[in-house]
Amino acid sequence: MMEHESNVNPTLSKSTGLPRKRFYRARAHSNPLSDSHFPVPVAPSQFDYSSHYPQISNDSKKIEFADIGCGFGGLLISLSTLFPATLMIGMELRDKVTEYVKERILALRTGNPGQYQNISVVRTNSMKYIPNYFEKGQLKKMFFLFPDPHFKEKNHRRRVISPYLLDEYAYALAVGGIIYTITDVEELGEWMKSCLERHPLFEPLTVQELEDDPVVKLLSTATEEGQKVARNGGQTYQAVYRRRTGPIE
């Protein structure tokens, strides 16, 4: 009996088998401009797909969705069953949060054979290493849900949506690919919308396109942060834009 109890993983819920967040709590945000040490592929061709998607046998498949700053992985989990044939990855800077998402995905795979094989997570700094992970035009969707607002003007350069970073995102997105953003901070919402509006390679989705897109409905409901905003009766601000053809493409 004692031997059995010693083998029980205290970080997993006995009822669901999923990891418990209280063992993986971390600061709400990290400084993306600080130097962190973790392995980064030197080029997209060096990314180890087999370790992230061990049940995917098609070597030609590439990641098509990227959740930037994926937090505790709620959006990935929801998207996994909505797009079961699409490979997607969460990119998270905080080490404890990344570890939680890894354990959550492994537990879901174990408890649901054949499912959740198309999602994974990597600890990285997406503000620095997007070109290391994705080839030109590889992605079809990028998500930026409730990013750090970096309120102080001197820290606006840390914002994950900015004119110069949109150049990198446009490089990774296929023509017709979509970038989704949402925040509960009005000023940040206006900032992200303004950056996208002014960039020559992005155009807004129409009202009808937004209504028809099943992903849009998940932006405010799939993540822990979005659920907290909803519980508190808060307002959210979305900006959803399409990658369009550039003048030399």
Image (cartoon, helix red, strand yellow):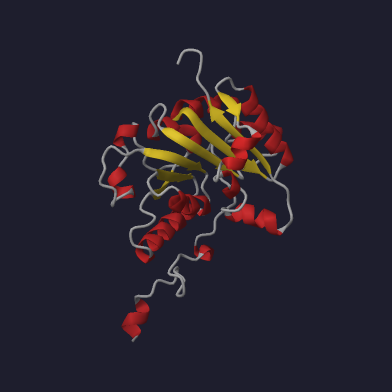
- Quadrant where the C terminus sits is top left
Residue shown at the point (50%, 26%) measured from the top left: 170
Residue situated in front as seen by the camera: 73 or 40:
73
**Viewed as shown, does residue 36 lie left or right of 148?**
left
54 left or right, relative to 214: left
* x, y percent for residue 169: 50, 30
In the image, residue 76 sits, relative to residue 241, either above or below, namely below
**In the displayed structure image, the side of residue 156 where residue 144 appears, left or right:** left
Tell me the quadrant of the picture where the N terminus can be found: bottom left
Q: Among all residues in the image, which is located at the extreme bottom? A: 1
Residue 85, position as x, y percentages in the image: 37, 46
Q: How many marks?
A: 0
Res 152 seen here: no
Q: Residue at x 41, y 55 (%)?
A: 102
Residue 213 appears in the figure: yes
For residue 179, above or below residue 219: above
Quarter of the view holding residue 150: top right
Q: Is residue 201 above or below residue 68?
A: above
Q: Position of residue 8 (x, y in %)?
A: 38, 75
| x and y percentages locating residue 32 in the rendered image | 54, 39
Instruction: Tell me which corner region of the image, top left, top right, bottom left or bottom right, holds residue 22.
Output: bottom right
Q: Nearer the viewer, residue 72 or 37?
A: 72
Q: Residue drawn at (30%, 35%), measured in percent from left and top?
A: 46
